[in-house]
Image (cartoon, rainbow, N blue to C red):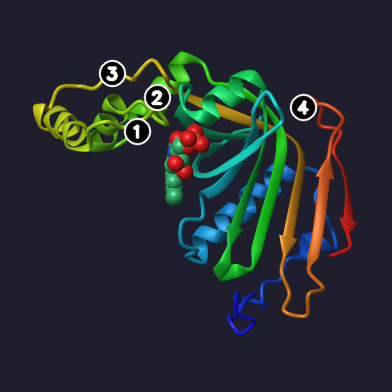
């Protein structure tokens, strides 16, 4: 691949004091970074790569959207029947990476995965636009597709019926409860800044932090 394609071309002027004076709580800092990405008009700031492993230890990744950040962790939604859903059922831990090209920022989290309650998942499903609800209802994510036209037709008919679409049984919210959180700010001289937080168990607030070499 070409050496001439520019990389690390984002904004190098961010004044990120957290690298010199880290706050105690990384989830608060994560919220500040997400708010900052919105303010700076980063494209798709909530898109993140989610990594899971299957029972044999084989990893797999895909992009999805973070839907919420609460005091326990990061919430996303997906299907229990999908590849990731089956892997999370077998091994409920995962890693997640956000990368914002415009601002040269990367955030990496890893930790335990828990399912949201049915009521919480219902509330998240209700937030989806009607066409997205219909698409979710007709698709059995990650299973083989025999007839695309038929799938599209069922989604169209359901959307146009105007009937309320109940949350499909497989569709659920998940929460990544982090045990590690790393904040990274890139630098064209490759002396990137890294700040990593770690805690011994998901339910303590005993976070420790340290800077890492780039
Ligand atoms: C920007 C973007 C956002 C996505 N958001 C979601 C999402 O919120 N939930 C989801 O299940 N898949 C989402 N996808 C699709 C996933 O990348 C993936 O194709 C799907 O979840 C099936 O993955 P699996 O077979 O590994 O389980 C998104 C893809 C992109 C590129």
Quadrant, the C terminus: bottom right
Label whose residue precedes the other's in the sequence (2 or 3): 2
Residue 62's x, y, as percent?
Answer: 53, 44
Residue 139 x, y percent position in the rendering:
31, 28
185 over 97 or under it: above or below: below
Q: Closer to the camera: disc 1 or disc 3? A: 3
Disc 2 on helix, strand or loop? helix
The residue at 77%/27% (across/down) is 202
Residue at the image position 57 percent from the left and 67 percent from the top? 101
Residue hosting label 4: 202
Say above or below: 97 vs 115: below
Quarter that holds the N terminus:
bottom right
Q: CA distance from mark 4 to mark 3?
A: 32 Å
The residue identified by callout 2 is 123
Whether ligand 1 has any atom under 8 Å from the Cβ at mark 4 is answered as: no
- Mark 2 to mark 1: distance in Å? 7 Å
Percent across and percent down for residue 177 are: 68, 30
Left or right relative to 102: residue 142: left
Q: Identify the residue position indicated by label 1 in the image.
A: 127
Question: Observer-nearest residue: 108 or 63?
Answer: 63
Callout 4: 10 Å neighbours few (<14), some, many (20+)?
some
Mark 3, residue position: 166
State left or right for residue 32 relative to residue 184.
Answer: left
Q: Are marks 4 and 2 in contact (CB under 8 Å)?
A: no
Label 1 Cα neighbours within 10 Å, binned few <14 / some 14-19 / many ≥20:
few
Contact flag, marks 2 and 1 (Cβ < 8 Å):
yes
């Amino acid at each position: 691949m070409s050496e001439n394609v520019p990389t690390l071309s984002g904004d190098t002027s961010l004044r990120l004091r957290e690298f010199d004076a880290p706050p105690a709580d990384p989830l608060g800092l994560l919220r500040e970074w997400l708010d900052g990405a919105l303010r700076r008009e980063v494209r798709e700031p909530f898109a993140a790569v989610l990594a899971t492993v299957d029972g044999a230890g084989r990893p797999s990744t895909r992009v999805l959207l973070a839907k919420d950040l609460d005091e326990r962790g990061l919430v996303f939604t997906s299907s229990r029947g999908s590849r990731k859903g089956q892997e999370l059922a077998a091994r409920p831990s995962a890693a997640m990476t956000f990368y914002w090209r415009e601002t040269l920022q990367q955030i990496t989290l890893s930790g335990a995965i828990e399912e949201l309650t049915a009521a919480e998942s219902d509330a998240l499903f209700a937030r989806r636009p009607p066409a997205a609800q219909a698409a979710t209802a007709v698709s059995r994510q990650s299973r083989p597709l025999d007839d695309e036209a038929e799938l599209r037709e069922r989604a169209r008919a359901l959307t146009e019926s105007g009937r309320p679409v109940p949350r499909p049984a497989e569709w659920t919210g998940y929460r990544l409860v982090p045990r590690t959180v790393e904040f990274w700010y890139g630098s064209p001289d490759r002396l990137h800044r890294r700040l990593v937080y770690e805690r011994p168990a998901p339910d303590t607030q005993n976070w420790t932090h340290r800077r890492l070499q780039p």
